Amino acid sequence: MRGHVDAESLALYAEGQLSRGRTARVRAHLSGCADCGRTEAALASVTTELSQVPVPPLPPAVAARLDAALSAESARRAGPEPAPAPAPPPRRSPRWSPGALRILTATAVTLVVAGGVGYAVSQFSGSTTSGASAPAGSSAAKPAHRSIQAGPFVTPGGPMAKPNTGSSSAAYAQTGTNYQRGTLAKQAQRQLAADTVSGMSGPGQVAAARIPAQLRTCAIQLADGRPLLLVDQARYQRRPAIVIVVGDPDKAIAASYSCVPLHSARLTARG
Amino acid sequence: MAGQPGPALSGPWGAQADPPDAELLRRHVTGDQEAFGQLFLRHRDRLWAVALRTLGDPDEAADALQDAMISAFRRAGDFRGESAVTTWLHRIVVNACLDRMRRRAARPVAGGEHDLDLLARTPQATPDTDVSLDVLAALRTLGPDQRAALVMVDMLGYSVADTAEILGVSPGTVKSRCARGRARLLPQLAHLRNQPGVPRVSPPAEGEE
């Protein structure tokens, strides 16, 4: 064999992937060529180097997101609960009472985009952190003094069911809106206007009391004591997500499907 | 798990867990709400490792894994038991990854697609060392097929036979892809070895089958 054997041939030789004749020639060459012997050894050490790269475990945030996605899938399969349509046209016919609108605009609003359905997590993983009761109960007291923010959604005598979060009375919608990172605040503002109202009376909407317990838990967790105004099962950057709007202080947060905040955006007063 | 290259598989193909995978899948098909979750829980770390190392990007890996699991969830009824459930799950994940890589290759990556917040919030339980980063960077220079084979066999310790089944190719093809991948990585990783440099070799000579 003239010259050295190239690395690829040596690698294929090591794997027994050369033809018989070529295998014999490489073997013969190797027996007398220290250089190629070293290359052969170096090829073996590539395998070692690859094997020594640590493999990180599934990050909890990703795990939760996947659980949520599967759980949503499970719910879709099982239940009559309408799944978010692929791309339903966003409803944006605000039917606020002027008073409610004023309150809202006055108190700048926090938006939380929680990536998809927190409720799915506990429901699915079987690890049952019993999302429903504990956080809901624990946060029950907090937003009480903020009832003015929650006010618009607890229309006295309105058709909205009693909020069984104990305190939060957000409207619940499943718009499937694809919220984008850059326009999060703007889209949320629109959705907020449309959905909170339709959440009370609009067709295809679900009253606050019917927000799935774990989803509610996630929302409350994200709201972190602030009044929860809207829960929208939607999309963020094309991924299944929920959008939660909370009032005061005035910032917006995006979170992953599994309740992990992804992004936040301040909602300025409606402009 | 990334230990020595030696004993390949004690992981997913090893001892069967309590309700066997196939039983869980069967329950899922017949409407059991929990079964698929259990199944996924059982294998998700491995599947994540495959996706992460094949794609080289946690955000993309998460997307691919999610796509794959939803797909597996829906197509569970198609599972015919011709392979192990783990093989089937791996195949779906790997295919989702390869699809992404090919799509990515087809059109240049639009910058800013990453959700940096999510990335920032994804804790690296095992921070990659400098060496690891070098290896991972080198790995990214390989084409999808070579990379998938090398990740599974050399990096994650799957056997050639299992890898072949997962990738849907012959064992010989897996070996060839791994061999070519190693040869391509060789010069890029030369600096990691405390040798006075890997010996010069002649240019690639198309000498293989």
Image: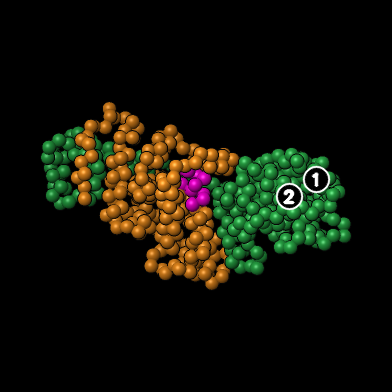
Q: Is residue B37 visible?
A: yes
Type of amino acid under label 1: Leu
Q: Chain of mark 1?
A: A
Earlier sequence position, callout 1 versus callout 2: 1
Which residue appears at 84% of the width and 49% of the height? A98
Q: Which mark is residue B80?
A: none
Q: Please tell me whether residue B73 is drawn above or below residue A44 in the rendered image.
A: below
Depth check: give the residue in front, A12 or B123.
Answer: A12
Instruction: Judge from the rendering whether residue A44 lies leftward or rightward of residue A260; answer left or right.
Output: left
The residue singled out by tag 2 in the image is: A192
Residue at left offset 28%, top offset 41%: B183
Q: Residue A123 falls in which quadrant of the image? A: bottom right
Q: Quadrant of residue A44?
A: top left
Q: Secondary structure at mark 1?
A: helix
Q: CA distance from mark 1 to mark 2?
A: 10 Å
Colour representing chain B:
orange
